[in-house]
Amino acid sequence: NGCKDFYAISVAGVTPSRYITWFQAAAAARNSGKRLPTNQEWQVAAFGTPDSTACNVSVGAVANTGANASCVSDVGAYDMVGNLWEWVADWVPASTACPGWGGFSDDLMCLSGASTTATSPGALIRGGSWSNGTSAGVFAVNGFNYPAGSDSDIGFRCVR
C-alpha cells in the first residue's frame, strides 16, 4: 500500500536485499527514481557474464554484493548470475514445467506450460541463485513465482 519507506541501492560488501516481493522491488526502484528492468534489458545486460564458478554458483549461501569480482558482464554489470534470482518487470501465465533449453544451454528454463489453476500470474525471475549451482546462468529464467511471494534466494536490480 504505497511502500514509500524503502529504496534501491547497491552497496559493495553488503548482503543484497532479498525476501522481497515483486511489488516491494518495484516500489523500491520507483522510490529511487528507477524501475525493474524488462526481461529483454536484463538479458542484454547479462551477456558475457561467466557461466562458471567465477559467479556464486557453488558456495551454498548468498554472497555480499561484489564478492565475486570476476562475475561481471560485457557491459560491467556485476553479480547477475548465481547469487540471487532477480525480479524483472515482465509477468507471464504461471509456468508449470522446467524443460530446460535442450542442447542450447544447461541453465534453468522454467517457462513451459501455462497453469489453468494458478491464482496469480508468474512474475519472471532471472539469473539463478546460489541454490541452483551450475544451472544458474545468463539464460536462467523462471516463471513459477507469484509477484506477491518472496524467498531467500530472490532479489532485484534496477535500471533508469
Image: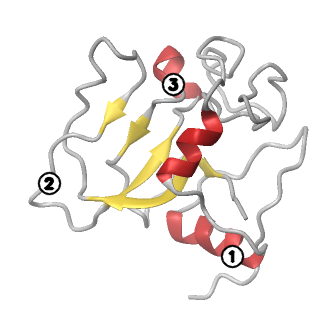
Tag 3's secondary structure?
A: loop
Q: Residue at x 29, y 24 (%)?
A: 100
Distance, label 2 to label 1, CA atoms, is 30 Å
Visible in this render: residue 12?
Answer: yes
Task: Estimate the x, y position of residue 63 in percent, counting from the top left.
Answer: 75, 31
Q: Earlier in the sequence, mark 2 or mark 3?
A: 2
* Residue annotated with mark 2: 115
Q: Residue at x 59, y 57 (%)?
A: 37
Residue placed farthest to the left in the image? Answer: 116
Q: Residue at x 53, y 63 (%)?
A: 21
Distance, label 2 to label 3, CA atoms, is 24 Å
Instruction: Assess whether mark 1 and mark 2 are in contact (beta carbons under 8 angstroms).
Output: no
Tag 2's secondary structure?
A: loop
Instruction: Assess whether mark 1 and mark 3 are in contact (beta carbons under 8 angstroms).
Output: no
Residue 108 left/right relative to 150: left
Looking at the rendered image, the disc whose residue lies closer to the viewer, 2 or 1, is 1
Q: Earlier in the sequence, mark 2 or mark 1?
A: 1
* Residue 136: numbered disc: 3
Q: Quadrant of the N terminus?
A: bottom right
- The amino acid sitting under disc 3 is Ala
Q: Residue at x 77, y 75 (%)?
A: 33
- The amino acid sitting under disc 2 is Ser
* Residue 30: numbered disc: 1
Q: Is residue 74 above or below residue 25?
A: above
Compare residues 86 and 40 and report the one nearer the observer.
Answer: 40
Tag 1's secondary structure?
A: helix
Residue 65 picture quarter: top right
Task: Estimate the x, y position of residue 81 in percent, counting from the top left.
Answer: 61, 30
